[in-house]
Image (cartoon, rainbow, N blue to C red):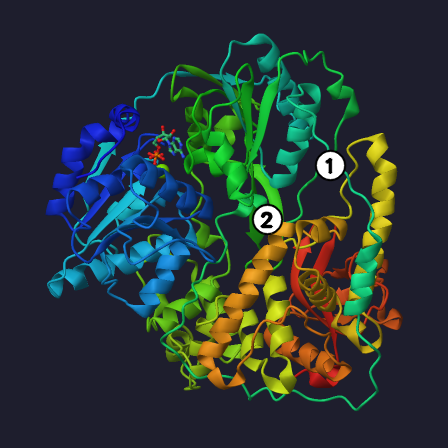
């Protein structure tokens, strides 16, 4: 029996999903798999786990598992459900990539989909669980899709073995045919239960014209108008990325101050002293050492307590933002600063304490204004919203399937997403949605967003699936299958990394085709699969124990897999006042990065040396917010790197206990000798990301000046001006990725020697 407080009980009764409790529970009893559709806010995430709990699905030793595509949702929903049920977080718990509060008493476990995928690797039958709920299935995140495919096999297996298990798939949209009308997935289509949302009418206001350039400016004007002219009620704004969110918050706070913010950045002399301490001492010259490419740690393991999470599904926050600078003229807009606006940002990378603020009532006498990315579209329901301002755009990462070049682009969202956004305005009373685009433009939006799995490289998934002994990945029951091209590319890369065994050359085309898509995993591949990073980086870890390079490889890999560790030096100033300070700051931070890049031999490790230097210096200083702020490092990223270093260290020790590697906060810089080894290790992982400088005498077209040639691209790619190797322009380099902005720029560049190239 659950002992809920009267207020909670009252709030629950208002949720539409409560009316369907009987129907849902009966369907669950009678079917192995059930699909539940219901508008965002109808109570699916918070209530369905409680129904199952009360029906006894966690009364034995088995527990109830719920997966979320976003960490934000896993954490905040577990807290909410614990509170509603009046149970401690020892019982209603969460687990995300780096942290969790699961105990032996846990009965309801919220987790990211990556965490559950990792558990399947350890126990394919998921015997701890009596039921798995896949939440937010409409988001079609890669891991969600894979989990549904795997569970479509696991559930019947459990039934066959007499240990029945249930699968619930929950979606905020009615578009579930990919799950239900897919006989490869479910031979008998699962029943679909529709929860009628009590949705108040939302009046949609389209713009007459569609601003193409300064849409954030338009958003600002619209909010000012709403705030000055319309009755009370919270405003929810949809933008595309973190920088946009921050810029708008700043502008709004300035226009309608709620309280004075003050952040001072005082220079600190100590900083460079710490750097100097970390900086490497000069080393004696020796002949170049060589890394043995066949000498890797490849003891496959079944145990290990790390979990995997790609950090995907957070696209809106990734990459360098298209920063829209402030427009001082618009701040002059006749705002009435006497009515405070309680402005709150909301995006995936925001600290949980900050995120939690949106659920609390705004201070008395203020109007709440939540400036969000699309995390607010379906995962989180923000109370009290009456007005939605929708810029109609979304930021997505695009990959070129052939060349692997990726770029972040802001594109129009889909009609389904725009309608989800509008729906946020009608949860508590009739509302209004202001679409900052015309109805004609809306008519041109695609109806739905594509499943993520069709849009990104899949080598990490293929390796995971091979590790689950799914050799013929093409035959896997994907709700939506990745393209054959993408699967072939993934297998080829994994073969070249040594993670899969090359198919024998039979000479027969048909057989070769088949074999190329069903290469078996190697022992190295199993070791790589146990590292919670992408295959290229896993390969580096596997080679890292040579020449005592492992601590450095771990630190570099951690830094390479965490996004945006450095403050963006090209960030525009928000005021005249800030402008001169910013110039000084830029100069100082550039200097700092030069220091981290080291000298002589270190310099050739390039951007990766800068990362290593930054990580080393930051740890040396105790990884404090102050240090990060002063040195242009993103604090959250540095904390994530720290956790990942710990996790990777454990993972390597599990695969190869005799190396006994540990995280040393006072890591000394690598020797010259080690730097050379590190460059070879990096090449072993990034071997397909090789670029050769086009020599001056070979240049016919001026666009090739300082350009690099890659095997797959016809056009030149460049070293970015902020790169440590921008001035050096080595003849041969490897890069982490190519990002297309104004030009095709390589990110994460290291120099290599021609004779190392296999
Ligand atoms: P769904 O999953 O169908 O979108 P939820 O179960 O997430 O719906 O939300 C149901 C209700 O619970 C919403 O009205 C929401 O406002 C409320 N709610 C969810 N989380 C919190 C929270 N942390 N604090 C207060 N209310 C919350
Ligand atoms: Mg939900």
Question: How far separated are the C-alphas under marks 2 and 1?
Answer: 25 Å
Q: Position of residue 26 (x, y in %)?
A: 12, 40
Query: Residue 88, image x and y in percent?
Result: 32, 45
Choose mark 2 or mark 1, whichever is in front: 1
Compared with 625, 473 (above or below) is below
Image spot of residue 515 (x, y percent): 39, 78
Q: Is residue 505 above or below residue 63?
A: below
Residue drawn at the location 76% of the way across and 42% of the way down: 571
Crowding at mark 2 (Cα within 10 Å: few <14, some 14-19, many 20+): many
To which residue does mark 1 refer? 263
Q: Which numbered disc, 2 or 1, marks the residue that appears first in the sequence?
A: 1
Q: Quadrant of residue 530?
A: bottom left
Q: Is residue 516 above or below residue 32?
A: below
| Numbered mark located on residue 50 in the image | none
Q: Is residue 372 left or right of residue 622?
A: left
Instruction: Report if residue 425 is visible in the image.
Output: yes
Residue at x-position 49% and y-position 16% = 233
Q: Is residue 757 left or right of residue 106?
A: right
Within 10 Å of disc 1 (Cα), the crowding (few <14, some 14-19, many 20+) is few
Name the residue carrying label 2.
318
Asked if one can make out residue 403 in the rendered structure from this viewpoint, the answer is no
The image shows residue 304 at horizontal and vertical percentages of 40, 72
Secondary structure state at the residue bearing disc 2: loop
Judging from the image, what secondary structure is the residue with disc 1 in? loop
Q: Quadrant of the C terminus?
A: bottom right
Quadrant hosting ligand 2? top left
Q: Residue 645, located in which quarter of the rendered image?
A: bottom right
């Amino acid at each position: 029996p659950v002992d809920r407080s009267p207020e909670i009980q009252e709030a629950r009764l208002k949720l539409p999903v409560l009316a369907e409790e009987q129907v849902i529970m009966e369907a669950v009893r009678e079917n192995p798999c059930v699909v539940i559709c219901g508008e965002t806010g109808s109570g699916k995430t918070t209530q369905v786990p409680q129904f199952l709990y009360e029906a006894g699905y966690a009364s034995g030793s088995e527990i109830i598992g719920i997966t979320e595509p976003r960490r934000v949702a896993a954490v905040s929903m577990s807290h909410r459900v614990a509170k509603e049920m009046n149970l401690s977080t020892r019982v209603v718990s969460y687990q995300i990539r780096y942290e969790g509060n699961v105990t032996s008493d846990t009965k309801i476990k919220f987790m990211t989909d990556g965490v559950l995928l990792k558990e399947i690797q350890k126990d394919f039958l998921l015997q701890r669980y009596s039921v798995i709920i896949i939440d937010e299935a409409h988001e079609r995140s890669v891991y969600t899709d894979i989990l549904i495919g795997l569970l479509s096999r696991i559930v019947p297996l459990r039934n066959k073995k007499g240990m029945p298990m249930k699968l619930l798939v929950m979606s905020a949209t009615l578009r579930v045919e990919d799950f239900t009308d897919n006989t490869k997935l479910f031979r008998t289509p699962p029943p679909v239960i529709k929860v009628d949302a009590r949705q108040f009418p939302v009046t949609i206001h389209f713009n007459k014209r569609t601003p193409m350039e300064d849409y954030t400016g338009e958003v600002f004007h619209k909010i000012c108008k709403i705030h000055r002219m319309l009755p009370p009620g919270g405003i929810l704004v949809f933008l595309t990325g973190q920088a946009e969110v921050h810029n708008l918050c700043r502008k709004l706070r300035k226009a309608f101050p709620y309280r004075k913010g003050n952040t001072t950045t005082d220079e600190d002399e100590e900083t460079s002293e710490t750097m100097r301490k970390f900086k490497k001492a000069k080393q004696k010259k020796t002949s170049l050492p060589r890394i043995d490419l066949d000498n890797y740690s490849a003891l496959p393991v079944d145990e290990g307590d790390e979990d995997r999470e790609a950090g995907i599904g957070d696209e809106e926050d990734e990459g360098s933002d298209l920063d829209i600078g402030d427009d001082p003229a618009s701040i002059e807009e006749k705002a009435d600063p006497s009515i405070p606006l309680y402005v709150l940002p909301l995006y995936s990378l925001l600290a949980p304490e900050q995120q939690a603020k949106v659920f609390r009532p705004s201070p008395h006498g203020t109007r709440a204004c939540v400036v969000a990315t699309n995390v607010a579209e379906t995962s989180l329901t923000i109370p009290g919203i009456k007005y939605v301002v929708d810029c109609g755009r979304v930021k997505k990462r695009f990959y070129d399937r052939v060349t692997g070049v990726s770029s972040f682009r802001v594109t129009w969202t889909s009609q389904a997403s725009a309608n989800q956004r509008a729906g946020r305005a009608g949860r508590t009373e009739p509302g209004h949605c202001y679409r900052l685009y015309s109805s004609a433009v809306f008519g041109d939006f695609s109806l739905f967003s594509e499943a993520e799995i069709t849009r990104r490289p899949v080598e990490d998934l293929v390796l995971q699936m091979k590790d689950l002994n799914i050799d013929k990945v093409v035959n896997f029951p994907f709700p939506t299958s990745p393209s054959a091209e993408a699967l072939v590319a993934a297998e080829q890369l994994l073969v070249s990394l040594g993670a899969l065994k090359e198919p024998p050359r039979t000479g027969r085309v048909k057989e070769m085709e088949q074999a190329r898509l069903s290469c078996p995993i190697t022992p190295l591949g199993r070791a790589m699969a146990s590292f919670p990073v992408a295959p290229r980086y896993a390969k580096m870890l596997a080679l890292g124990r040579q020449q005592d390079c492992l601590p450095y490889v771990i630190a570099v890999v951690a830094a390479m897999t965490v996004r945006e560790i450095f403050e963006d030096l090209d960030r525009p100033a928000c005021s005249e006042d800030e402008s001169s300070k910013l110039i000084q700051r830029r100069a100082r931070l550039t200097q700092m990065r030069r220091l981290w890049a080291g000298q002589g031999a270190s310099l050739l490790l390039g951007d990766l040396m800068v990362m290593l230097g930054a990580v080393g210096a930051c740890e040396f200083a105790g990884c404090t917010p102050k240090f990060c702020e002063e040195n242009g490092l993103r604090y959250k990223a540095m904390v994530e790197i720290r956790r990942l270093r710990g996790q990777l260290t454990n993972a390597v020790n599990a695969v190869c206990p005799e190396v006994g590697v540990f995280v040393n906060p006072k890591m000394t810089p690598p020797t010259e000798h080690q730097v050379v080894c590190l460059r070879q290790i990096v090449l072993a992982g990034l071997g397909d990301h090789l670029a050769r400088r086009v020599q001056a005498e070979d240049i016919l077209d001026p666009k090739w000046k300082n350009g690099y040639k890659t095997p797959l691209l016809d056009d030149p790619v460049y070293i970015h001006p902020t790169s440590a190797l921008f001035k050096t322009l080595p003849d041969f380099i490897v890069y982490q990725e190519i990002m297309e902005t104004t030009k095709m720029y390589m990110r994460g560049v290291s120099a290599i020697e021609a004779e190392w190239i296999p």
